[in-house]
Amino acid sequence: MRRINPFFFALILFAAGFAAAYAILQATPSIQTAGKALIGGPFSLVGTDGKRVTDRDFRGKLMLVMFGYTHCPDVCPAELQTMAEVMDKLGADADALAPVFISVDPARDTPEVLSAYVKAFNPRITGLTGSPDEAASAAKAYRVYFKKAGGGADDYSVDHSAFVYLMDRDGSYLTHFSFNTPADAIVTVVKEHLSGGKST
Ligand SMILES: [Cu+2]
């Protein structure tokens, strides 16, 4: 058998690598689409008035959903401030958007505690809590990570992911914003979806 030219062999390896990379890139969009569909879903929680609230109560409005807790030192206050700014900047369009803050610390975030907390940012923000299982189930639906970290029995922090999710009028996932996304950027995307000009 003829000996393969090393240069030719290297060329084949390179071509194979290129083909593999191309295949992965081609496959990526379908992976992302599958991931999108998996974010969100049914939840059953307790509102700040103590009444049961489910995802179905928000049908017909876009939802801006974030998870956090009232004792959070920095991330949650910053994100709630951004949510409040989004509502202010939307003006009349704010009626079409439901901002929702779901507690990952239901042990301390009673409906009363949560109510005072979220209303201080904006009276339109809905605070939701529930049993530990209900909160965990909602977080799981949104692929939100959270874990109690350090501190004592009543004095602890909760690590949690800090995405803000934008959900469609039927409760399906549209997109999400990472921590520190400016209110203006969120308003732009919300308005695109409100006008129906963008299909994700
Ligand atoms: Cu937080």
Image (cartoon, rainbow, N blue to C red):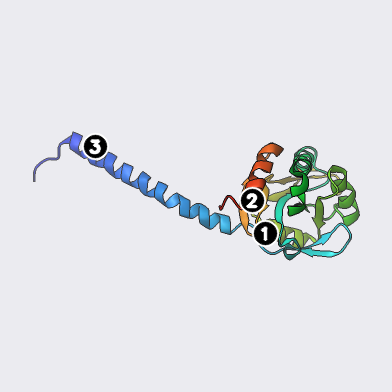
Give left or right: position of 110 versus 140: right
User: Mark 1 vs ligand 1: CB under 8 Å?
Assistant: no
Rendered location of residue 163, percent (x, y): 67, 46
For the point 27% across and 42% down, the residue is 15
Give left or right: position of 97 versus 11: right
Which numbered disc, 1 or 3, marks the residue closer to the eye?
1
Q: Is 60 situated above or below 19?
A: below
Which numbered disc, 1 or 2, marks the residue closer to the eye?
2
The numbered mark, 1 or 3, whose residue comes first in the sequence reads 3
Which three-letter amino acid code belongs to the residue tagged 1? Answer: Arg
Rendered location of residue 135, percent (x, y): 75, 58
Which residue position holds label 1?
Answer: 169
The label shown at residue 10 is 3
In the structure shown, which secondary structural element does the residue marked by tag 2 occupy?
loop
Q: Pick whichever, 48 or 93, lies toward us.
A: 93
Rendered location of residue 43, percent (x, y): 72, 63
Which residue position holds label 2?
Answer: 195
Residue neighbourhood size for the residue with mark 3, other residues' Cα within 10 Å, grouped as few (<14), some (14–19), many (≥20): few
In the structure shown, which secondary structural element does the residue marked by tag 3 occupy?
helix
Mark 3 near mark 2, Cβ–Cβ under 8 Å?
A: no
For the point 86% across and 48% down, the residue is 123
